[in-house]
């Protein structure tokens, strides 16, 4: 018998650790190749680690809830092997774990229990990884103090390096405390909730907590304004009805309205780069790439946003296959963390649930999000050579929420008008 090491995989450039949420196998159980062993979670996505070999799970090195650095050995699997199991003189898996864990921790001696603080992060509007929370607790950093640290991570998040850098200068800053301090702004607190007999209290799962925190953060960061426009998508509906059966027969998958909206939006974003942007203090960052996020409802009621990268460089067939692939893997919890990051604009489809329209919340650090409403047959006035006539048309409402710090009503209106023109002038003879 030989031992095979299962390591915490690299899940993206910005991911340095993950939390073990659930062991799917117990010690002594038989494993088949590609069979899932453990569920893990990052601040981006939940996923599973499959076994790369057949064997028996011989040792579990971390418990559920532990935060483990990428590259660390988390379990051992015994496999059939002709060679003798002679590990004398080699580094034991447990020693490798200890070494990697020490490299990922603070070089300074750990604080004693008396210096540890019990931090309540429920009132903080910022997201902190489990590793950052653990370091803050050990170093006696309060939530209020942590909220003041400028983050260098994605969306301004505080990283391990940020908190280490802060600790190096912490003493000097405390010694040079100003003699006068400006009055702190009053902190908003949620109203107290009382329960009555028969009420059911359900704790949010991890993903819903992240969604809740991000939504509150976005509303606090960006002054939201929403504009609406009617679009006659009769040409789009007729074209899809004409090609969908042949497309399904040829490609083995469906063509929905979603990739059509993505292609049209990518074209409009190229013409209005101020919408494909971010705000960094008083700087406006115009994004080179057009990476459109696709808000996707999950079976458990939560929401995830996989990203179609460089949507403007893909043809409609490519967008369709990408949309279908990401949507399917999102619903089956098979997305990689990098596939839900890096978005520069987002589209959410209210129409899939027959909603006419809505006012979505911006996905930070983007500056706009487009909502697609339900397509309905309505009487509409058409201008013809013989005069105005009333006809039955397929009408849809587009709504776009935008960050009023850099996007004004005029810019939003021009963008929506251009998107309307692209969709209403859809070529019904187009070949895909």
Image (cartoon, rainbow, N blue to C red):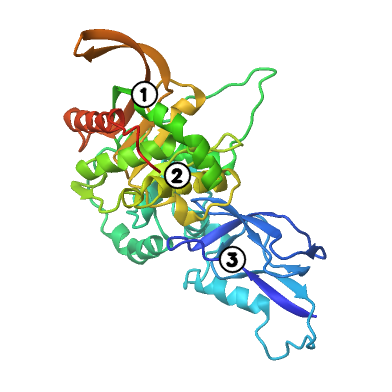
Q: Where 38 sits versus 344, above or below?
A: below
Q: Nearer the viewer, mark 3 or mark 1?
A: 1
Identify residue for label 1. 234
| Quadrant of the snapshot with the N terminus | bottom right
Question: Which secondary structure lies at badge 1?
Answer: helix
> Is residue 160 left or right of 170 when viewed as pictured?
right
Tell me the number on the disc at residue 8.
3
| Quadrant of the snapshot with the C terminus | top left
Identify residue for label 2. 320
Q: Which of marks 2 and 3 is nearer the N terminus?
A: 3
> Is residue 271 left or right of 158 when viewed as pictured?
left
Q: Position of residue 6 (x, y in %)?
A: 65, 69
Q: Where 96 sits versus 26, above or below?
A: below
Nearest to the observer: residue 133 or residue 140: 133
> Is residue 316 left or right of 6 when viewed as pictured?
left
Q: Which residue lies furthest to the bottom in this view?
A: 89
Distance in Å between CA atoms under marks 2 and 3 = 33 Å
Quarter holding residue 226:
top left
Q: Which of marks 2 and 1 is nearer the N terminus?
A: 1
Q: Where is residue 254 in the image (x, y as percent from the top left)?
A: 52, 39
Q: Residue shown at 72%/65% (left/top)? A: 33
**Can residue 240 be seen here?**
yes
Q: Residue shown at 26%/51% (left/top)? A: 287
Q: Where is residue 349 in the image (x, y as percent from the top left)?
A: 44, 31
């Amino acid at each position: 018998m030989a031992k095979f090491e299962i390591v915490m995989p690299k899940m993206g450039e910005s991911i340095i650790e993950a939390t073990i949420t659930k062991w799917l196998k117990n010690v002594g159980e038989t494993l088949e190749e590609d069979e899932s062993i453990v569920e893990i979670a990052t601040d981006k996505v939940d996923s599973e680690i499959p076994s790369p070999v057949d064997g028996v799970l011989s040792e579990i090195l971390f418990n559920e809830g532990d935060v483990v650095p990428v590259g660390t050995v988390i379990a051992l699997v015994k496999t059939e092997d002709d060679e003798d199991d002679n590990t004398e003189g080699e580094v034991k898996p447990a020693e490798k774990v200890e070494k990697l864990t020490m490299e990922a921790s603070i070089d300074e001696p750990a604080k004693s229990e008396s210096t540890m603080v019990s931090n309540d992060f429920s009132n903080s509007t910022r997201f902190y990884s489990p590793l950052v929370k653990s370091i803050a607790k050990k170093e006696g950093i309060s939530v209020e103090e942590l909220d003041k640290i400028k983050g260098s991570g994605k969306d301004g998040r505080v990283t391990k390096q940020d908190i280490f850098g802060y600790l190096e200068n912490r003493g000097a800053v405390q010694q040079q405390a100003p003699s006068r301090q400006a009055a702190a702004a009053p902190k908003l607190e949620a109203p107290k909730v009382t329960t009555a007999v028969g009420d059911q209290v359900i704790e949010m799962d991890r993903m819903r907590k992240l969604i809740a925190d991000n939504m509150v953060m976005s509303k606090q960061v960006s002054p939201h304004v929403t504009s609406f426009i009617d679009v006659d998508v009769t040409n789009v509906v007729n074209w899809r009805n004409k090609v969908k059966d042949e497309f399904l027969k040829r490609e083995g998958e469906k063509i929905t309205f979603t990739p059509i909206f993505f292609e049209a939006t990518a074209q409009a974003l190229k013409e209005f780069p101020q919408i494909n942007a971010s705000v960094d203090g008083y700087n406006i960052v115009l994004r080179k790439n057009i990476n459109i996020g696709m808000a996707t409802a999950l079976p458990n009621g939560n929401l995830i946003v996989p990203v179609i990268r460089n949507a403007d460089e893909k043809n409609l067939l490519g967008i369709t296959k990408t949309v279908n692939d990401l949507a399917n893997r999102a619903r089956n919890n098979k997305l990689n963390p990098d596939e839900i990051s890096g978005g520069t604009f987002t589209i959410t489809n209210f129409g899939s649930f027959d909603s006419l329209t809505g006012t979505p919340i911006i996905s930070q650090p983007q500056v706009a999000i487009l909502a697609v409403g339900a397509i309905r047959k309505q009487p509409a006035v058409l201008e013809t050579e013989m005069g105005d006539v009333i006809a039955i048309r397929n009408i849809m409402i587009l709504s776009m929420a935008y960050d009023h710090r850099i996007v004004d009503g005029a810019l939003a209106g021009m963008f929506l008008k251009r998107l309307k023109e692209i969709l209403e002038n859809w070529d019904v003879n187009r070949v895909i």
